Image (tube, grey):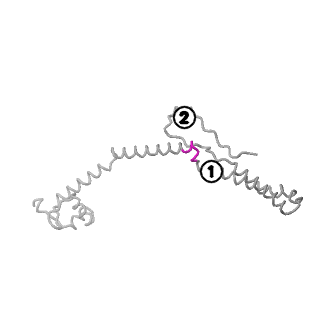
Amino acid sequence: MSESNNTVPLDTISKLLDLTPRRVNQLTKDGVLPKVDRGRYALVPVVRSYIRYLRERSVNTDVGADDYAAHRARLTKARADMAEMEREQMASSLIPSDDVADAWEVMAGNMRSRLLAIPSKTAATIFSADDVVDAKKILKDTINEALAELSSIEVKTANPIRSAELDDDSEEDVKPVSTTTRTKNK
């Protein structure tokens, strides 16, 4: 029997190559598998073509120059993103979330203590107030004082973003940025 006379139907090719009939048709349309007649395939050329296709696909998916270039591009983008974040941080337009959380914790603690101190701080002066208007003014002044203290809390970077481009030798010479002063005490 010659190779050209040995044709098989689509179902046989599908089973032999472990593909669905739809995938076999797609590979035929893409020029990967040769087709002899309508619904008929030459067995040996189809198998050889499919093996060649799998080899080429395997070689193309191995780690190669394309993957290296893609990884290099990702690394370059990551470094550029870090430099951008560092620049924004130096301009005080980017503050790490941990530093913001610490500042909120300080603010909440200060507000709590200031609010709890209002009754004992103002009780005597409110008691000696001439009328309700004076009592309201005393309370309002005390609350405004507490709010002014809250507004004086500064959020600054305590743990700056560091670029990964520093050499091992240069890291010893780099001094950390001073840590944050959380509140301005009055």
In front: 106, or 22?
106
Q: Measuring from the top left, give residue 93's x and y in whole percent.
A: 57, 47
- Indicate yes or no whether the magenta region holds residue 93: yes
Q: Which residue is drawn at the image coordinates 64% and 47% (left, top)? A: 155
- On the picture, is 15 further left or further right than 106? left
Q: Secondary structure at mark 2?
A: helix
Q: Measuring from the top left, give residue 137's x and y in whole percent.
A: 81, 58
Q: Secondary structure at mark 1?
A: helix
Residue type at mark 1? Val
**Quadrant of the frame with the N terminus:** bottom left
- On the picture, is 87 further left or further right than 152? left
Corner quadrant of residue 9: bottom left
Mark 2, Cα crowd under 10 Å, few <14 / some 14-19 / many 20+, is few
In front: 137, or 176?
137
Residue 100: mark in rendering: 1
Residue type at mark 2? Glu
2 or 1: tag closer to the N-terminus: 1
Q: Measuring from the top left, give residue 80's x and y in whole percent.
A: 46, 43
Q: Which residues are magenta?
A: 88-94
Q: Which residue is drawn at the image coordinates 61% and 38% (left, top)? A: 177
**What number of labels is visible?**
2
Which residue was labeled with disc 2? 171
